[in-house]
Amino acid sequence: METNHGHRHGHGDDGDIENVEVLRGKETGGHGDSLEVFDKNNSFYGRSQPLLVKRTNTTSQIAIVGANSCPIESLDYEIVENELFKQDWRSRTKVQIFQYVVLKWALALLIGLGTGLVGFFNNIAVENIAGFKLLLTTGFMVEEKYYKAFAAYAICNVSLAAAAAALCAFFAPAAAGSGIPEVKAYLNGIDAHSILAPSTLFVKIFGSVLGVSAGFVVGKEGPMVHTGACIASLLGQGGSRKYHLTWTWLKYFKNDRDRRDLITCGAAAGVAAAFRAPVGGVLFALEEAASWWRSALLWRTFFTTAVVAMVLRAFIQFCATGKCGLFGEGGLIMYDVSSAKTAYSGPDILAVIFLGVIGGIFGSLYNYLVDKVIRTYSIINEKGAASKILLAITVALLTSCCSYGLPWFAKCIPCPADESSCPTVDGSGNYKSFQCPPGYYNDLASLFLNTNDDAIRNLFSTSTEKEFHISSLFIFFASVYCLGIITYGIAIPSGLFIPVILAGACYGRLVGRLFQPISSLDTGLFSLLGAASFLGGTMRMTVSLCVILLELTNDLLLLPLVMLVLLISKTVADNFNKGVYDQIVKIKGLPFMEAHAEPYMRHLGAGDVVAGPLISFCGVEKVGNILHALKSTGHNAFPVIDEPPFSDAPELCGLVLRSHLLVLLKGKVFQRERIISGGEEIFRRFSAFDFAKAGSGKGIKLEDVEFDIEEEEMEMYIDLHPITNTSPYTVVETMSLAKAAILFRQLGLRHMCVVPKSQGRPPIVGILTRHDFMPEHILGLYPHINPHK
Amino acid sequence: METNHGHRHGHGDDGDIENVEVLRGKETGGHGDSLEVFDKNNSFYGRSQPLLVKRTNTTSQIAIVGANSCPIESLDYEIVENELFKQDWRSRTKVQIFQYVVLKWALALLIGLGTGLVGFFNNIAVENIAGFKLLLTTGFMVEEKYYKAFAAYAICNVSLAAAAAALCAFFAPAAAGSGIPEVKAYLNGIDAHSILAPSTLFVKIFGSVLGVSAGFVVGKEGPMVHTGACIASLLGQGGSRKYHLTWTWLKYFKNDRDRRDLITCGAAAGVAAAFRAPVGGVLFALEEAASWWRSALLWRTFFTTAVVAMVLRAFIQFCATGKCGLFGEGGLIMYDVSSAKTAYSGPDILAVIFLGVIGGIFGSLYNYLVDKVIRTYSIINEKGAASKILLAITVALLTSCCSYGLPWFAKCIPCPADESSCPTVDGSGNYKSFQCPPGYYNDLASLFLNTNDDAIRNLFSTSTEKEFHISSLFIFFASVYCLGIITYGIAIPSGLFIPVILAGACYGRLVGRLFQPISSLDTGLFSLLGAASFLGGTMRMTVSLCVILLELTNDLLLLPLVMLVLLISKTVADNFNKGVYDQIVKIKGLPFMEAHAEPYMRHLGAGDVVAGPLISFCGVEKVGNILHALKSTGHNAFPVIDEPPFSDAPELCGLVLRSHLLVLLKGKVFQRERIISGGEEIFRRFSAFDFAKAGSGKGIKLEDVEFDIEEEEMEMYIDLHPITNTSPYTVVETMSLAKAAILFRQLGLRHMCVVPKSQGRPPIVGILTRHDFMPEHILGLYPHINPHK
């Protein structure tokens, strides 16, 4: 009988500590291309062979953008069952359980309040900054100082853009972009440190305000989701020694499971705050963001978004009195279209189907182009902060030129009879006169020289068929579609919802005008359906988009049509590529676990992908061996194997975590003899909280420990039994990888032990981690497998 | 080393074949009480000891009502990996995968169409039957023939009720009640044969129409959910030999996973059809019905409900032309309140909080009383079909007396100035004149002598503060609350939504009238909030109720208040008891697996609850042994253990299923020698579809097989390897039961193998099934455990 007693070997793990290797610059572009190739055939591995050999099984992360800033760890949702934790469970009193429950709801309340406040602040700030900018510009326009007007407009835009980009570049590079892919990855179990850090939160809030005010074709929705998640993460840190927040209650949240729940609530609160759509927020978190979900969480998320809705409603009521500067009217419904008569018949439905199909194609094209643009920009952005800022300024200038230049091509249109959509004298209304005389308005300027929200409101407005020329709509659609694509990827917090809604609404209005001869549906409603088709084509959500659109527009009667459009556009777009957030997750190299297993995984066994020699410990192990293993590998867990004399034959005692070992090493719980101590000393000196998982990037580090340990202590022993998780999840080596992957994903594991089929062999074959299930890893080991068979 | 070679022993399993023991009559009541006691302390087991000893571990089902009609099996969502299925996977062509995908969507479409049609038929039938009955009654009233009117009214009601009860009693006892608990249990993995049978579908549709038309305080929502699930189950049978529907495509759905998905779609379609609420339907399926959920399923469910919405919309548009008899106007929105001005301030919110708290108390009281009534009625219902019908007739008579008698206590109210709510001459309007002279109306009659839908519409109607007297509202509230409670449990298909909404709406209007001095909120909106509070208090759903109410009433501005009310009433009610559907699942004795583990499960290991001796097979086993094991136990799976000479030491080869064994026995795949055959004969003679799981109650039975096998064949061997699932999920015996329960629940298992901690022992300790996780079983084994610690 062979035992791996003498030598201890390394097994594959997350590559937690090693800095993740990233491809940059020219290479990145090239690699991006080969990823494309890999999607079509498997010649990828032929071309990139050296790279993969070099990186074998330390990580499967193949990042294109932004990943160099953060080493990636996995989160661990397993219930660790060691002696110490079991004792802790048994001793938990009713009071402690009560504290936990109270705090759980209190934190949900705080997340709701915080996100609601930020959402409201964001609204006010954008309306006031952008409003000031627009008033300044129109002021000059009224005086016919056209060049001065452009200068004022462009300077405002460029400086706001530069400020946003500088914040991102210098303080928190992780705050760039939408944030939804990162939150989605976190909720899938990927912990890239800085994505939920306080600095990211700060930059996300202010960068988003500056970016949106700068007139970019970006939204605040993605950043709000990220903001909500950051707030939740901050609250879930379990206190802070630095700021003397070491309240016992907070410690209950020092584990990944509770943090995951909080961050799910945060993501939902973000959507609720951005769209004033509480139910939509819950559904967004459920459909797009979260990878694990329980009924109890639905209920807590619902509470959080209800708090957000109430906070927003209270502030909006307060602002209706005119105390919030340029942020004035408007209720909870952002774009109310409920006034339109909704009756539709056969031809209308045909028009809507056409709209959905073309919208799906445009949506998937959007995803394709965004992907290309991100890859191109990453080359520029990698060159440093200065080039990031320069890129943002360039795009800001381009946007300014479009917004100010293109309206000159539009003809002046006389105001309609009821004057409701006529420009106000001071230019603060939704319709702009631009160069036109009083009594006339410029339809393109009414779309371009407005905040994105107001432009959408104009496009959605009902009973206004003729108020926008087809040519104006076409110019606006083309420029917004392109601007949206080239804006995503610059180093500012930038949401994708608003650009897509804006382009989609314009597209819908265009289609509505084209179908006017045969369809009696209001063009405002067409505009809404167009927005739905674009959203379905890019985001690929269904129920949540449906409810968000409902809550945005308050038109329930249109629901069947919205559902139809979403179904069609998603189906069409799914034929071409994946949803935009999935694409970005992939580009960022985040090892996302899908809910389903790939077909080729059925042909492999769990034992087939276990790689590398295995490092394991004895039940009572030498300090020196432990220290060496921790130093020489980045593994996060080590199997503990009991051997004679502690057992009759070698048997798997369980798994021990790196962080738990470090606690024992720091506390120097050593013993001179190689005996099972029973753990009394550990139980006396430590509580379960000492082993609780610290917040991301915190916790004891190996460097803190290794120099404290003296030479003679190296020869002493540690009894690992009290901290060994005695019931890790195991699978037999012959289980198909597909089945193992589903087990791994559904339980949210970080480590899965593979045990041998037959007795008489060493009791563990290897450990599977998230990276072992990644296609890059598997197809690297078995290049002959065709992933698309 | 001990091996269990010689004797084979029985291990605990679902008790599939044995008829489930049920408690009836007097005993039931007594047992019901002791279940109550068990909820409070653990003296339960002291009192019921004999019962439990007798039933040890064959099943934990402790049914109070209706379970005698169906033996209960578990569903199996595990991916069975045996040689045969692996070969099948590998050989699946792209065409077959395409067929599968197409059929998946085609079935979703058919479920949507079918459920939509049934929902529409239901609507038309109820409106016409009940309308005819009401017109007849009011006709006599106008002629002042009051006794004749009552006689007509009561005879109609009683005969409709008797018909509904007779259908239920004679054709499908499983069709009685709401159906949502049964669907919920099915989706949790509990297969009680007749609950989704075609006869149940038939009775559910027609019984529901008759019951609702009979004027009972019941709804059609629960039955519609059940109907949708039945339709889905019927479509998912995988064809039928009897009706020559043996299309290959249909066979892809012969497994529990695909059927589960279909039935989830069906449940969603049911809600969508009942409330005309497509998004609410999806969320209902997600929040209340389904136990497992994936993003892909959300998308398919959404498609199904969209189809339902479109079918309904098309038919409603068709009926608007007057071709559907008394079913006339009305769009997709059932109770439109969007006309009301929604502005609220501090005092309104206080009033709403009060409403929520009291609503929660009333809701939980409702659950408590329904529980008691069901237990009482079960004693009557057990006595046979005649007593079932008699009970229904009694309740129908009582309801008729209330509806016709109580309006006499109301005073006549002069019609309001705008005449919109004045009774029409023929009595078909929403307001009834009853005994009043022209120009006056009777407010109580307008509530009582109407269909439930119209009564709710009257209560929800806005800007009608004074149209109902407080005394009338109070009388109506009290009688509807009581009638709702005593009606649930009689042998007719009866939904719970409508009674709760009706009582809640009336309660809300009452509270609105009380708070009129301080609150400016419309009483119609109060009525809506009251309905929300009752729904939250009984059903304990959140997001789905919110969306359903939104889709019912089309008032998005009220959303924050509805959310607040739901949160409060659910929180209050959760302090008293569980949701009404959970209660009914428990009363019916269905072994429901909760998503979380009970605290006491942390103190036990998985090995601690494994009971009974284990029956296992050799890799190549004697036919006689197999037949004996199948005959003498009801187990559904048997471990297969390879022993020398097939392996060096005994090792767990996997699990073999009863149904797969029966296929081999029927096909007589026997061999004379005890050797590993390699399975060529099996691969040649059978395809994977032959082993596919037949629909509930179908499949090969032991009786079909055992008499065909001759004496000499008994001594022959079967090579079990090709049909053995070689990778069953295993847990180590020391894993805490809590952790094992979560694994079991999250993966949707039917069997979980418990393996020993140390090598050198037999390779399997036992098999855990659903019943081993039931509190009744565990606390029966360990009576000293306090389940509420």
Image: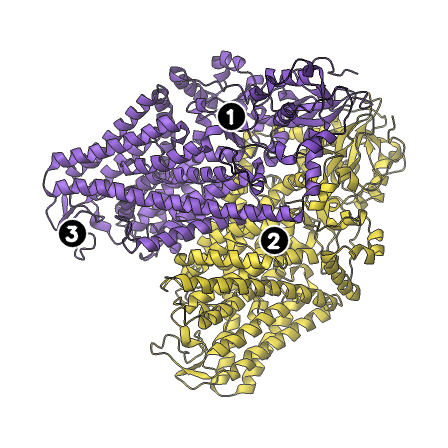
Chain colours: A purple, B yellow
Which sits in the foreground, A145 or B223?
Answer: A145
Of all chains, the one bearing label 3 is A
* Mark 3 nearby-residue class (10 Å; few <14, some 14–19, many ≥20): some
Question: In the rendered image, which residue does mark 2 sit on?
Answer: B230
Q: Check whether the beta carbons of the residues at disc 2 and disc 3 lie within 8 A of each other.
A: no
**Helix or strand or loop: what does disc 2 sit on?**
helix
Question: In the rendered image, which residue does mark 1 sit on?
Answer: A72
Residue extending farthest to the top is A50
Give above or below for A5 relative to A734. Answer: above
Question: How far from the left and from the top, in percent, is residue B396?
Answer: 62, 74
Question: In the rendered image, which residue does mark 3 sit on?
Answer: A415
Of all chains, the one bearing label 1 is A
Q: Which amino acid, by three-letter code, is at mark 3?
A: Cys
Spatial CA span between label 1 and label 3: 58 Å
Question: How far from the left and from the top, in percent, is residue B352?
Answer: 46, 63
The C terminus of chain A, quarter of image: top right
Question: How far from the left and from the top, in percent, is residue B756?
Answer: 78, 31
